Amino acid sequence: MRLLFLLPLTTSLLSGYLCKKSADEMAYLTGTATVVSLILALILAPWQIQLLILCVTIFGTKKLLLKNLSKSESNSTAQSITQSDRPQIAIPSISSENDAVAEVKGMYRGAPWLSSQEKTPAPQPDPANLKYRGASVVKQGSSDQ
């Protein structure tokens, strides 16, 4: 059996350890070295080890898939039960001083999310009396003659 694959495997383990201990750009460099060394070690590994890794991957993912499917089925039944058992909350309409109408748009963290819309638009300032930092603004293109 070839033991040449142990060199990149050792390199990947060492650079992985350094990646955990280093910070910033050095971590990116050592992380890249870890991934490249690990891939090279898997390519150079004997076929028996590659077959063992393949079998572990296939059977391990099958068990995880079955475990996740059973969890999702139990979660979906629990969610349907809890959603049907929730009491309905009556949300009163809120009126403000500006005669705004509050409309319920949805729920946010369990509280109603209200969207208020004014019945009358806000008054617009007269464009002839605009002021910027206390000085009157006059349009250049307009003349009062």
Image (spheres, rainbow, N blue to C red):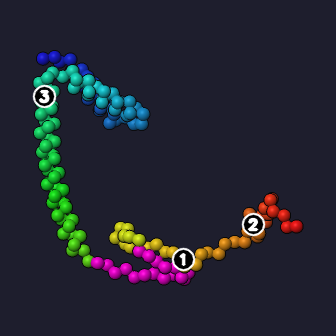
Mark drawn on residue 118? 1
- Whether tag 1 and tag 2 are in contact, CB under 8 A, the answer is no
Residue at left offset 44%, top offset 76%:
103
Q: Position of residue 86 (x, y in %)?
A: 24, 74
* Residue that extends furthest to the right in the rendered view of this protein: 145
**What stretch of residues is rendered in magenta?**
88-104
Q: Position of residue 128 (x, y in %)?
A: 77, 69
Tell me if residue 66 comes above or below residue 41 in the rendering: below
Q: Position of residue 137 (x, y in %)?
A: 78, 63
Tell me if residue 59 comes above or below residue 105 in the rendering: above
Point out the image quarter for the C terminus: bottom right
Decide: few, some or many residues near mark 1? Use Cα within 10 Å; few <14, some 14-19, many ≥20: few
Query: Label 3 is placed on what type of residue?
Result: Leu
Left or right of residue 112, residue 144 in this image? right
Point out the frontmost of discs 1 and 2: 1
Q: Is residue 10 visible?
A: no
Magenta stretch encompasses residue 93: yes
- Residue beneath label 2, please? 131
Q: Quadrant of residue 59?
A: top left
Residue at left offset 15%, top offset 46%:
64
Point out the frontmost of discs 1 and 3: 1
Left or right of residue 109, residue 137 in this image? right
Point out the image quarter for the N terminus: top left
Q: Is residue 142 visible?
A: yes
User: Mark 3: which secondary structure?
Assistant: helix
Mark drawn on residue 41? none
Q: Position of residue 49 (x, y in %)?
A: 14, 26
Tell me if residue 83 comes above or below residue 61 in the rendering: below
- Whether tag 1 and tag 3 are in contact, CB under 8 A, the answer is no
